[in-house]
Image (spheres, rainbow, N blue to C red):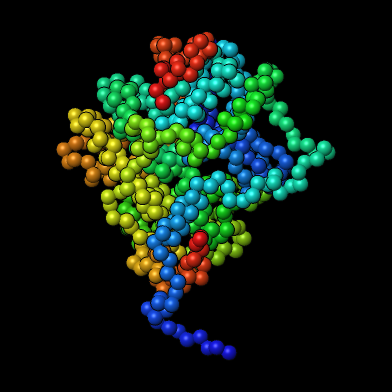
């Protein structure tokens, strides 16, 4: 049996893995990307077996009279042109070569105010930084929670 | 000829004929856990009896229309016999797009409206331009106004001078209602209860309990206190969709401060979350988005414009979009702008009675204005001249 000895935070810090700046930045952008997601769960439909001839998906019944006319124009150009995601569209716009103002130039620049810090566990103002990941915490209690749950999460 | 006004937002479509009133309808499709085979479109949301774990299919990504399949399903439903029964050959449509909409999206829009739906005439514009029209028609003596449109995907600051959009002054803060809801979901899931799948429920929580703090650090202190002294904390009763159809805030007098309720409902306890979430609009850097908050971006925008206009802009700031409905938003923005603006310039921030439908109402006014026929593109025009005529006439 090994008895666990309580060590000082500073001694311990030297032994813990420390993430470099680039990794921290990657983690942050992953967190911010997650905030743009539409859904976090799986599509309820995808968890079902693919519809066979017995279980057909119900078609949309609210289409109009000129249904046939529309179907024709929905042809192949529809599939190619109307199936692009945001990033592809943004690239295709070639905005860096275009005259300003444009989508890219309109983004608000970084704030001139100093950043404020909040405990990533409880949300209250924080004074301390986790040596490992750079996350903020406000008390040793929150630091414990942080290390046990989030400290190295989202790390690639 | 009828005119249909459609403010096509990324989360909700504000739609109605110019003779009638507006309806706010979800601009998306849903799937639910209980009826997995069916896809619900727009206001069919009301048919879902148990909207827990609601799955969203949105036509917009980061504020721009990318998923046309979904958008057309929604439009088919809106224009169709269940709702607006649009007679396309005899209808003109006013439709909105975001600022700096990508040219490929604009072209697709022309094709779909003219060729697929065959509208008689079309006016494509920005929601901001309709709001500006609304503002200038109610206050004809004003020269300039600065619109703050804070919606689902992002917040735009758009200066207008005599109904002309001043593109060089447009600023975008990438914080909108979607990010706020997702952030609230994230912190609740980490601190109390796993709700990552419950966008629909948590969005309601956000609308019910979140507010914009007037004294942020003071409120932080209060929300840290124990018992009665903590005037910020609220207990929110989550819906179970059988006996409780809709979540609600427990009245203050029924609150048990120990948090131990005997009634057995599922409770969320919200303290600093109530105001720390909308705070992202004012300080995006709090969660690591390296952008100015709305007040700073407004000043940045105004300073990029000719100096003789500054006074007019600071005096006519108009708020539109769903995030404006956080209580305290206007007061906080006005106070922060007062601190940032030059001392000799008066600052005034105007909140219309219905900030979500303000652009739609502007579109309604525009549809009745005498020169409406001059600004639209008709189907014959488009068939004759193609995309070029739309590029010429529409200011996107």
Residue at 58 percent across and 47 percent down: it is A39
Image position, residue B141 (x, y; %): 26, 21
A38 or A62: nearer the viewer: A38
Residue at 45 percent across and 17 percent down: it is B388
- Which residue is the extreme one toward the left? B344
Residue at 50 percent across and 46 percent down: it is A36
B4 or B377: nearer the viewer: B377
The quadrant in which residue B79 appears is top right
B28 or A106: nearer the viewer: A106
Residue A138 visible at all: no
Image quadrant containing the C terminus of chain B: top left
Answer above or below: position of B127 versus A3.
above
Left or right, B43 with respect to B61, comes to: right
Answer above or below: position of B216 versus B45.
below
Numbered circles on residues, count: 0
Image position, residue B357 (x, y; %): 45, 30
Residue at 46 percent across and 22 percent down: it is B124
Image position, residue B298 (x, y; %): 30, 39
Residue A69 visible at all: yes
The quadrant in which residue B43 appears is top right
- Which residue is the extreme one toward the right? A54
Image position, residue A56 (x, y; %): 78, 37
The quadrant in which residue B136 appears is top left
Answer above or below: position of B35 versus B133.
below
């Amino acid at each position: 049996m090994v008895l666990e000895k309580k060590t000082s935070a500073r001694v311990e810090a030297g032994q813990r893995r420390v993430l470099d700046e680039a990794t921290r930045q990657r983690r942050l952008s992953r967190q911010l990307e997650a905030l743009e997601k539409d859904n976090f769960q799986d599509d309820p439909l995808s968890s079902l077996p693919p519809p066979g001839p017995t279980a057909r998906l119900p078609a949309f019944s609210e289409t109009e009279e000129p249904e046939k006319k529309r179907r024709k124009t929905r042809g192949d150009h529809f599939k190619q042109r109307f199936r692009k995601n945001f990033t592809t569209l943004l690239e295709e716009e070639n905005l860096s070569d275009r005259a300003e103002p444009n989508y890219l130039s309109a983004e608000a620049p970084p704030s001139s105010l100093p950043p404020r810090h909040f405990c990533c566990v409880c949300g209250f103002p924080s004074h301390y930084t986790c040596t490992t990941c750079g996350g903020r915490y406000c008390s040793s209690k929150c630091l414990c929670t942080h290390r046990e749950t989030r400290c190295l999460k989202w790390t690639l | 000829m009828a005119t249909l006004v459609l403010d096509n937002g990324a989360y909700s479509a504000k739609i109605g004929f110019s003779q009638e009133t507006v309806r706010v309808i979800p601009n998306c499709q849903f799937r639910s856990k209980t009826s997995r085979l069916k896809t619900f479109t727009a206001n069919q949301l009301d048919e879902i009896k148990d909207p827990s774990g609601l799955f969203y299919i949105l036509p917009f990504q980061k504020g721009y229309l990318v998923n046309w399949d979904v958008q057309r399903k929604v439009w088919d439903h809106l224009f169709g016999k269940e709702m607006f029964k649009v007679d396309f050959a005899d209808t003109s449509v006013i439709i909105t797009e975001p600022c700096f909409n990508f040219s490929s999206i604009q072209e697709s829009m022309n094709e779909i409206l003219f060729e697929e739906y065959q509208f008689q005439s079309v006016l494509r514009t920005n929601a901001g331009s309709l709001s500006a029209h609304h503002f200038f028609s109610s206050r004809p003596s004003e020269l300039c106004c600065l619109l703050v449109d804070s919606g689902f995907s992002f917040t735009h600051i758009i200066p207008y001078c005599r109904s002309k959009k001043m593109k060089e002054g447009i600023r975008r803060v990438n914080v909108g209602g979607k990010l706020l809801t997702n952030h609230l979901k994230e912190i609740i899931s980490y601190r109390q209860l796993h709700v990552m799948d419950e966008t629909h429920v948590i969005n309601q929580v956000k609308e019910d309990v979140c507010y914009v703090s007037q004294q942020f650090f003071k409120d932080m202190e209060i929300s840290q206190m124990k018992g009665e002294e903590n005037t910020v904390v609220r207990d929110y009763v989550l819906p179970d969709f059988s006996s409780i159809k809709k979540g609600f805030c427990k009245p203050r007098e029924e609150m048990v401060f120990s948090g131990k309720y005997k009634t057995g409902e599922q409770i969320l306890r919200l303290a600093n979350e109530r105001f720390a979430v909308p705070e992202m609009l004012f300080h995006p850097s709090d969660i690591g988005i390296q952008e100015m908050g709305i007040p700073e971006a407004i000043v940045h925008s105004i300073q990029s414009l000719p100096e003789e206009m500054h006074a007019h802009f600071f005096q006519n700031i108009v708020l539109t979009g769903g995030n404006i409905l956080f209580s305290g938003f206007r007061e906080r923005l006005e106070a922060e702008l007062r601190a940032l603006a030059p001392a000799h310039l008066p600052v005034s921030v105007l909140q219309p009675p219905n900030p979500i439908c303000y652009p739609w109402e502007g579109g309604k006014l525009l549809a009745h204005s005498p020169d409406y026929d001059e600004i639209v593109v008709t189907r014959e025009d488009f068939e004759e001249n193609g995309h070029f005529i739309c590029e010429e006439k529409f200011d996107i």
